[in-house]
Image (cartoon, rainbow, N blue to C red):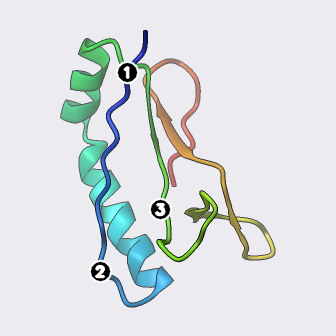
Amino acid sequence: MAYRIHIDIPLMSSCQEEAVVAAKAIMERLASPEVLECVSLHKGTQVNYRLGDDTDRQKSNYLVLTPSGHVTNQKCKIFLTDEPSSVE
């Protein structure tokens, strides 16, 4: 059986752009080599994350935009294998 750690960090941002900046800064710290090494040591193979909006009923990711500027539901992924990561 696989288990997952779900971490929910409410951001009191006044706009989407501010929330994106805050989320990227937090993920930069959480994706430090020390943390990723710890995840790997505990047999974790990847870290998935997204920036959501509480008013959006869908699981949209405000860190990934389409060419036309719309949000997607694609998660950002940091792979701890040889696979290329999709870090925003």
> Mark 2 is on which residue type?
Met
N-terminal label among 3 and 1: 1
Where is residue 70? Give x, y as percent: 73, 73
CA separation, marks 2 and 1? 29 Å
What is the x, y in percent for residue 53? 50, 71
**Residue found at x 38% / y 62%:** 24
Question: Farthest residue toward the front?
Answer: 57
Category of crowding for the residue at label 3, using alpha-carbon neighbours closer than 10 angstroms: few (below 14), some (14–19), many (at least 20):
many
> Which circle, 3 or 1, is nearer the viewer?
1
Q: In the image, what residue occupies the spot 38% across and 90% down?
A: 14
As measured in the structure, the alpha-carbon distance from the residue carrying label 3 to the one carrying label 2 is 13 Å
- Residue at which label 1 appears: 3
Residue 59 drawn above or below residue 65: above
Whichever of labels 3 and 2 marks the residue nearer the N terminus, that label is 2
Q: Mark 2 or mark 1: which is in front?
A: 1
In the image, taking residue 62 as reference, residue 69 lies left or right, namely right
Q: CA distance from mark 3 to mark 1?
A: 21 Å
Amino acid type indicated by mark 1: Tyr
Question: Which of marks 1 and 2 precedes in the sequence?
Answer: 1
Three-letter amino acid code of the residue under disc 3:
Leu
Residue for badge 3: 51
Q: Quadrant of residue 19?
A: bottom left
Looking at the image, residue 3 lies above or below residue 73: above
Which residue is located at x 54 percent, y 36 percent? 85
Q: Secondary structure at mark 3?
A: loop
Residue extending furthest toward the right: 68
Depth check, front residue: 83 or 77: 77
Indicate the quadrant containing the N terminus: top left, top right, bottom left or bottom right.
top left
Seen in the picture, residue 84 relative to 45 is either above or below; the reply is below
Give the secondary structure at mark 1.
loop
The residue that mark 2 highlights is 12
Dot 2 alpha-carbon crowd within 10 angstroms: few under 14, some 14 to 19, many 20 or more: few
